[in-house]
C-alpha cells in the first residue's frame, strides 16, 4: 500500500488554514494551496511550508512517499544549511513530486546513459519522483546546481553561449560530472556548497 501524508498530522483545526511549526529546525508557516507548476502542466493541492525568510516548500497533500521519499523536515533542514547570500539569489519555490519529469524522454535522447531527472530548476526547483533514500550532501549540491541555472538565466544565459557549448562538446565525461561542475557553476560549489 502506498504511503500517503497522514492528513491528521497536517490538520490545522476546523477554522484555521495555517499554523506555525518548526520543520528541520526552521520556523515555518504551514498552509494549504492549489498550485500549478511546470508551465501549468501539473496542478495539485499542496501543503506549503513557508520559512521565515520566504522560501516555500511544496509537498502534494496526497504525496506517495513510496515514490518521493523527501520529507519536509529534511528538505528545509538542508536548505537552511546553505549560506544566506546564496539563498538570497535563489528561487523561492521548491516543489517535491512523486511523478517523473514529463521531459525525461527529451533528456534521454540528448544525454547518453540518462535514466531520469532528479531535479530541475527554472523559476522554481522541482524534485521529481525518487524512491531511494535522499542523501543530504547530494540534495545540498542539487540545490546549488539548480540555483546555478536560475542565476545563469538571470545573468543572460551564459550556458547558452559559445564558450559553454564548446566546453560541453569537448567534455567526454558522464552527465552528472558534465552538468554538475559546469564552468558557470564552479564558483558556487567552491564558495557555497562544500
Image (tube, grey):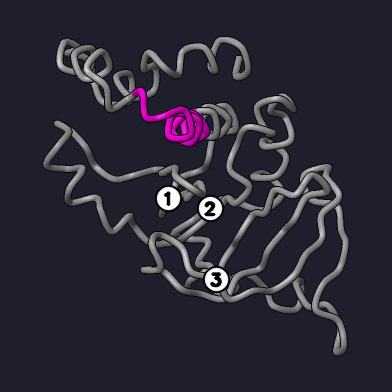
Q: Do the residues under discs 3 and 2 have CB atoms within 8 angstroms?
A: no
Q: Quadrant of the C terminus?
A: top right
Q: Do the residues under discs 2 and 1 have CB atoms within 8 angstroms?
A: yes
In percent of the image, x 70 and y 44: which residue is there?
76
Q: Circle 3 sits on which residue?
A: 35
User: Quadrant location of residue 95?
Assistant: bottom right
First in residue order: circle 2 vs circle 1? 2
Front one among 111 and 162: 162
In percent of the image, x 75 and y 78: which residue is there?
8
In this picture, which residue range is highlighted in magenta? 145-158
Q: Compared with residue 44, is residue 95 higher up or lower down, i.e. above or below?
A: above
Q: Circle 2 sits on which residue?
A: 69
First in residue order: circle 3 vs circle 1? 3
Callout 1: SS = loop
User: Quadrant location of residue 88?
Assistant: top right
Residue most extreme to the left: 109
Cα–Cα gap, marks 3 and 1: 21 Å
On the image, the x and y values in percent for residue 44 come to 50, 74
Q: Circle 1 sits on which residue?
A: 130
Q: Compared with residue 174, is residue 10 higher up or lower down, i.e. above or below?
A: below
| Dominant secondary structure of the residues highlighted in magenta in the image | helix
Amino acid at each position: 500500500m502506498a504511503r500517503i501524508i497522514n492528513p491528521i498530522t497536517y490538520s490545522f483545526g476546523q477554522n484555521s488554514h495555517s499554523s506555525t511549526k518548526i520543520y528541520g529546525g526552521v520556523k515555518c508557516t504551514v498552509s494549504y494551496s492549489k498550485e500549478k507548476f511546470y508551465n501549468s502542466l501539473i496542478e495539485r493541492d499542496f501543503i506549503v511550508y513557508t520559512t521565515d525568510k520566504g522560501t516555500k516548500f511544496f509537498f502534494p497533500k496526497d504525496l506517495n512517499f513510496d515514490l518521493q521519499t523527501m520529507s519536509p523536515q529534511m528538505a528545509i533542514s538542508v536548505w537552511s544549511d546553505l549560506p544566506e547570500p546564496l539563498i538570497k539569489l535563489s528561487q523561492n519555490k521548491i516543489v517535491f513530486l512523486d511523478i517523473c519529469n514529463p521531459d525525461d524522454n527529451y533528456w534521454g535522447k540528448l544525454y547518453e546513459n540518462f535514466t531520469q531527472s532528479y531535479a530541475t530548476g527554472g523559476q522554481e526547483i522541482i524534485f521529481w519522483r525518487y524512491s531511494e533514500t535522499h542523501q543530504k550532501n547530494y540534495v545540498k549540491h542539487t540545490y546549488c546546481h539548480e540555483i546555478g541555472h536560475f542565476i545563469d538565466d538571470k545573468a543572460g544565459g551564459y550556458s547558452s553561449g559559445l564558450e559553454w557549448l564548446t566546453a560541453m562538446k569537448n567534455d567526454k565525461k558522464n552527465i552528472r560530472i558534465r552538468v554538475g561542475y559546469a564552468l558557470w557553476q564552479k564558483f558556487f560549489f567552491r564558495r557555497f556548497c562544500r
